[in-house]
Image (cartoon, helix red, strand yellow):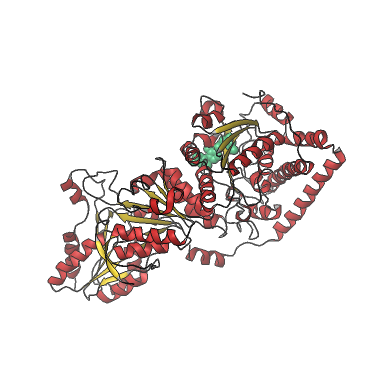
Amino acid sequence: MSAREIMYRDALREALDHEMSVNPAVFIIGEGIAERGGSYKVTEGLLDKYGPQRVRDTPISEASMIGAGVGAAIAGARPITEILYIDFAMLGMDQIVNQAAKFRLMTGDRGSVPFVMRTQGGAGGAVAAQHSQSLEALFYHIPGLRVVMPSTPYDAKGLLTHSLRQDHPVMFLEHKHLYMTKGMVPENDYEIEFGQAEVMTEGEDVTIVAWSHMLLKAMEAAETLTAENVGVEVINLRTLSPLDTDTIMASVAKTNRVVIAQEAVRRGGVASDIASYIQEEEFYSLDAPIEIVAGLNIPIPFNLSLEKASVPQAQDIVAAAKRTLEHA
Amino acid sequence: MGGELMARKKNSIDTEVLKKIYRTVSRIRHFEEQGIKLYRQGLIKGYFHPYLGQEGIAAGVCAGLLPGDNIASTHRGHGHCIAHGAEVKGMVAELLGRRDGYCKGYGGSMHIADIQNGNLGANGIVGAGSPLGVGAALASQIIGDGKVTVTFSTDGGTNNGTFLESLNMAAIWNLPFVLVVENNQYAVSTPISEATRDTELYKRGEAIGVESHRVDGNDPIEVYEVTSRAIEKCRKGEGPIMIEAVTYRHAGHHVNDPGAYMPEDRLEYYKGIDPIIRGRKALKDMAGLSDTEIDAIDQEVYDEYEEALEFAKASGEVTAEEFHEFAMGY
Ligand SMILES: Cc1ncc(C[n+]2csc(CCOP(=O)(O)OP(=O)(O)O)c2C)c(N)n1
Ligand SMILES: [Mg+2]
């Protein structure tokens, strides 16, 4: 079967559709996901195809929507809970952190939680402080969770398919700016295993590590840098937990310079953790300090210019890469 | 609130069921009494919330469940685990932190789970079992496995937001879900009357259109009669149902809480309607058993525990190497 160009949201829908068609234990609950097809049209058409048992609208009860997903997973189903905004997942943190992530250990590895929470984050055009956050670090911090952050339509489909075929609780974090982006996606089903980063561009001079929407800005930065004869290696992490440190280290060992770019606020972020691994494993390969490009340590403001100023842009990544090149 | 609990006429119940219920009450009672001794000897560490005085609820509810039905439990969860079919030896081993425990010593008293029998686990978070139980019931409805899920919750749990959220979700979806609220009238030292204005908690279910009942939680037979009917209704697709079971602890919140805030006359009253007393009376009145025959049931329970304790003490611990390997892939 052949690949064709489709949108990220269509790629997600194809994964859901296929898994629902082959596995009757897969179901989806969320706010406005049935008749309405979800705010980003990811679940459009699934109600008609799979019926109201397996595609259900919920009341506005985030803690219990997430908890019901966790409970259903424990009891043998393959639930997906869609949470409108990652900001709202905060209401369900007990069920994510204390229940889903702990269950396997607490049961002495006798229980598992094949639960997928799909949600989306990121600054997205004046939706202000409570609808714009990048909160992956909260989940990344919790042992037991898989944190998945697809950047491309191809990754979206393959990672979601894999999420629905493995047995750990998955925080599947989409980005509101990615739903309408396009890319080549095979028609057939396929899986992308967790912990397998993709090297998007190969280069000798500097490595840029990114995930989610920031990957697009990293690619834009790479284009600028390439035009100035800088060899850039862009790494698309795909998943944060597990983290593919092998691919990062191999690249750093080759380029000796690295920029880590995240949309989330700098403090306590995933980028800092990646930097700590790099200094531990590849300290002597480094020719320049590790650069982190991250959001400001402040909530996202409403005003669009200020919103833009609060999250990193492609030129910030370019500037950081150039700073690393100033070192011999 | 206190003595004015609803009296119900008992229908005839099969002798084997009555025996099973009494045996469960006795097993839980003995497990808790012996467990407290082990705790005092320093063999059990951490938190231990005894179910003493409340045994009639787990025993009565679980007697109406089928093997494989799911339950979600609370921090006071030993009784639910026993009542839903767990073996005492794996439970003692778990409380001692040993590798032959139900959770290999990774869970302990507060997280004991018996997945194989459908006990999805005790829970250290008050109120968390409600959404988990709703999810299990949802899974059953979608997969069509015919199971009913019971969540055991608490008076304290009814003041967590998940109580209303979950019961409401179960209601809009007609889930095979029974929410049993064990109202022992305290959340640690805070009496229910200080935690809510109307202490008749079953009314909260009614308020959102859920069939709800209040039963005498110290009477295992009444608990069984009401919940087994509820469970059967749920199995037919007429759920969910909420049941408030009123009871009282025989001791403080956990082993190291003297429970000084519990008035002596109230405690005496509830000890006078202890589920052991009620269970024995039911076996005599309804099944014609003699004291000797009932004592023989107790003796079997003691023997079972004796063996379980030996088994648990002989069990080793998960090694650091095994633990590290587990952590690598976690
Ligand atoms: C969410 C949460 N808040 C607080 C606690 C601490 N805590 C443990 S048990 C308990 C009281 C519980 O009372 P209740 O829910 O009525 O159950 P009971 O102990 O009476 O069985 C509290 C406050 C907790 N475990 N979880
Ligand atoms: Mg209580």
Q: Is residue A292 visible?
A: no
- The x, y position of residue A128, in whole percent, is 24, 43
A16 on left or right of B198? left
**Residue occupying image coordinates x 29% and y 73%:** A251
Q: Is residue B85 visible?
A: yes
Identify the image quadrant of the N terminus of chain B. Answer: top right
- The x, y position of residue B120, in whole percent, is 57, 50
Give residue B61's quadrant in the image. top right
**Residue occupying image coordinates x 33% and y 47%:** A85
Question: Closest to the observer: B123 or B35?
Answer: B123
Ligand 1 position by quadrant: top right
**Residue occupying image coordinates x 70% and y 52%:** B88
Q: Is residue B57 depicted above or below B200 in this figure?
A: below
- The x, y position of residue A121, in whole percent, is 30, 51
A179 on left or right of A77? left
**Residue occupying image coordinates x 68% and y 50%:** B85
A123 on left or right of B3? left
Question: Closest to the observer: A195 or B72?
Answer: B72
How many discs mark residues in the rendered view?
Answer: 0
- The x, y position of residue B135, in whole percent, is 50, 47
Name, please, the residue furthest toward the left: A228
